[in-house]
């Protein structure tokens, strides 16, 4: 046992947030203490993201600061985890000798061993000579070599299964919300993307492991679960083919994009398989305590009617899709190797809206992909105007080492053009978002309360500083609800099942507003803006 203090900071996607939670749990189980500030830590770990250069730059600047402190004589162990460690590999150690250890996302189960190796080497005054193998755990191409996949994946599966089922009540939404992984890695190889290189082959977890994890989280008070995978609708587990020596089902390699050519658009189970629709229905039935079951990210192709039916028919499965289109130009989609056309994307969206009229749709768009012309860009604008997206994350294309794009295309759209297209799309999306939100005015919605609203927190900070409150306006020209005078009444924020953000005031009740955090409340919507809804609590 150790009493060392660990500071762990996370960059990147929800997958990384979950990995960090698992790593923290694992280290705490071994006696390490997780601390809130890097200045209080013996070990500083950064769980990094490589998806865009900007994401890497954030981590580099942190690594630079700790490196400087080490050069100034502080005794800190510095570790780089996650996608950047995997992408950069041992080059990173050569360029940044202050970094002590590297651990890729597919090797996180080995992290305690790496820390331990370094500690031992230090005790014997051989810190700097510690062999690479003792301080580096990367998958390299290994996870794409099928013969050894099961063993490696099974160890990773154990890390997910060994999750400390003890949601922290001080964590977000009072420990009521959690992520559960269903698929690791990705086999799609979009030409711009590092994820298949950093996260390895697409591997599906056995449905029983997933359901058990949901059940355990529910027993600890979790009411919202978000299932994670890069293309969740391609989840598929064939039973009876991959078993461990003890007869248990183990993770299973998924097929590539070409395997999903279903002429009837139906991804439902064939024979002894669990499809994504089966998995959703299975969790819904097995764990009724989960009031909200969501999933990210969906792929615009091969999203069967069976999945839409399961969402429509099960009240606790959220009518929410995060389904990135990436571009509205068929020429660009082809260069991206996305494997669908704009027409296929629209056919899917129309089918989803027809079956589930209240469905919320969010997405991602890349602007300035190599060779993108004004005409291609206009096609993307047209797509945004055509689809009722509640929001889109818009990214400027960032060339990534190791991708097909970098090898094959020049990053030829100038930064100024990327910025202009980015801003134009944000403006278009804002109009579309305003329209989507406006449709909810006058309706009642269930809101999972997340926090005392940031706006109110800011307002009270401003008034403490003796400054006047600025007034924000909605699209209707109304002032957004300002912080009420009565200190017992606070403004809270949360989300609908469709992931729309809602602000409302707590009622003038004797119990503190904070008690509502983590509960589901019925709210009547009075007003809207491009970014959110606002309303008041319905009293029963
Ligand atoms: N699996 C998801 C996306 C995961 S990466 C999917 O296929 O939809 C999250 C988002 O980052 C992507 O949707 C894409 O819009 C963006 N992204 C990925 N690589 C990028 C790059 N090289 N430059 C800019 N944006 C990128
Ligand atoms: Fe990247 Fe494409 Fe896989 Fe998404 S589907 S993670 S964009 S390779
Ligand atoms: Fe980033 Fe890796 Fe997630 S590259 S987006 S942390 S899968």
Image (spheres, grey):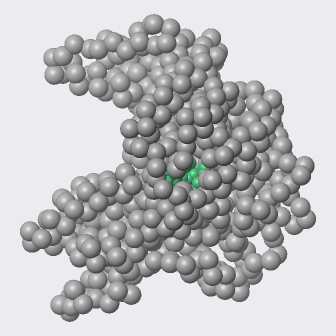
Query: Viewer-proximal residue, 7 or 406?
Result: 406
Say which quarter of the image contains residue 43: bottom left
Q: What is the tally of numbered marks visible in this picture?
A: 0
Q: In the drawing, does residue 346 fall left or right of residue 109?
A: right
379 or 197, which lies in front?
Answer: 379
Residue closest to the far top? 477
Looking at the picture, does residue 202 appear above or below residue 139? Answer: above
Is 459 rendered above or below residue 99? above
Taking the image as shown, residue 426 lies to the left or right of residue 315, namely left
Residue drawn at 44 percent across, 69 percent down = 87
**Is residue 475 or residue 419 the one in the foreground?**
419
| Residue 400 appears in view | yes
Residue 482 position (above or below residue 315): above
Picture residue at 26% right of the left edge, 83% below the top: 119
Look at the image and tell me in which quarter the C terminus lies. top right
Q: Nearer the viewer, residue 290 or 360?
A: 360
Q: Is residue 281 visible?
A: no
Q: Residue at x 64, y 38 (%)?
A: 328
* x and y percentages locating residue 308 in the rendered image: 79, 41
Q: Quadrant of residue 123?
A: bottom left
Residue extending furthest left?
72
Looking at the rendering, in which quadrant would you find the N terminus? Answer: bottom left
Residue 265 at x, y percent in the picture: 85, 48
Q: Position of residue 80 (x, y in %)?
A: 34, 68
Residue 400, position as x, y percentages in the image: 46, 60
Placement of 5 over or under 459, stated as above or below: below
Tell me which residue sits at (54%, 27%) in the image: 429
């Amino acid at each position: 046992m150790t009493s060392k203090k660990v500071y762990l900071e996370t960059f990147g996607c929800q997958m990384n947030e979950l990995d960090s939670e698992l790593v923290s749990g694992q280290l705490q189980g071994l006696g390490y203490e997780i601390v809130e500030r890097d200045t209080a830590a013996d070990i500083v770990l950064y769980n990094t993201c490589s998806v865009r250069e900007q994401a890497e730059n954030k981590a580099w600047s942190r690594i630079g600061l700790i490196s400087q402190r080490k050069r100034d004589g502080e005794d800190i162990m510095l570790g780089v985890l996650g996608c950047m460690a995997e992408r950069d590999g041992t080059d990173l150690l050569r360029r940044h000798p202050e970094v002590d250890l590297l651990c890729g996302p597919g090797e996180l189960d080995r992290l305690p061993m790496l820390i331990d190796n370094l500690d031992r080497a230090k005790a014997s005054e051989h810190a700097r000579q510690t062999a690479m193998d003792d301080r580096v755990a990367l998958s390299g191409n290994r996870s794409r070599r099928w013969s050894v996949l099961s063993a490696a994946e099974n160890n990773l599966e154990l890390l997910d299964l060994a999750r400390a089922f003890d949601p922290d009540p001080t964590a977000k939404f009072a420990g009521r919300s959690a992520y559960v992984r269903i698929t690791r890695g990705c086999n799609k190889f979009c030409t711009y993307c590092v994820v298949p290189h950093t996260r390895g082959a697409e591997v599906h977890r056995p449905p029983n492991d997933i359901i058990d994890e949901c059940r355990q989280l529910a027993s600890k008070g979790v009411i919202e679960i978000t299932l994670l995978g890069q293309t969740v609708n391609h989840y598929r587990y064939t039973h009876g083919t991959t078993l461990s020596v003890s007869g248990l089902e183990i993770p299973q390699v998924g097929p590539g994009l070409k395997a999903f050519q279903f002429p009837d658009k139906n991804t439902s189970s064939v024979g002894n398989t669990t499809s994504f629709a089966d998995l959703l229905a299975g969790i819904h039935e097995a764990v009724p305590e989960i009031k909200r079951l969501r999933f990210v990210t969906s792929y615009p192709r091969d999203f069967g009617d069976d999945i839409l039916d399961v969402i429509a028919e099960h009240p606790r499965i959220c009518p929410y899709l995060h389904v990135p289109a990436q571009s509205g130009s068929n020429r660009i989609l082809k260069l991206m190797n996305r494997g669908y056309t704009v027409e296929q994307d629209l056919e899917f969206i129309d089918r989803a809206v027809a079956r589930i009229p209240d469905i919320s749709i969010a997405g991602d768009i890349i602007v300035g992909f190599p060779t993108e012309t004004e005409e291609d860009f206009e096609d993307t604008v047209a797509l945004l105007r055509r689809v009722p997206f509640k929001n889109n994350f818009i990214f400027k294309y960032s060339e990534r080492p190791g991708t097909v794009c970098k090898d094959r295309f020049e990053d030829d759209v100038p930064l100024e053009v990327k910025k202009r297209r980015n801003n134009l799309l944000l403006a278009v999306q804002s109009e579309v978002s305003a329209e989507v939100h406006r449709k909810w005015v006058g309706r009642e919605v269930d809101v999972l309360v997340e926090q005392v609203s940031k706006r109110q927190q800011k307002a009270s900070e401003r008034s403490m500083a003796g400054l006047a409150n600025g007034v924000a306006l909605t699209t209707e020209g109304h002032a957004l609800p300002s912080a009420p005078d009565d200190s017992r009444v606070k403004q809270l924020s949360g989300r609908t099942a469709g992931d729309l953000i809602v602000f409302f005031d707590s009622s003038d009740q004797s119990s503190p507003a904070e008690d509502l955090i983590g509960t589901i409340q019925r709210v009547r919507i009075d007003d809207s803006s491009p970014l959110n809804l606002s309303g008041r609590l319905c009293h029963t």
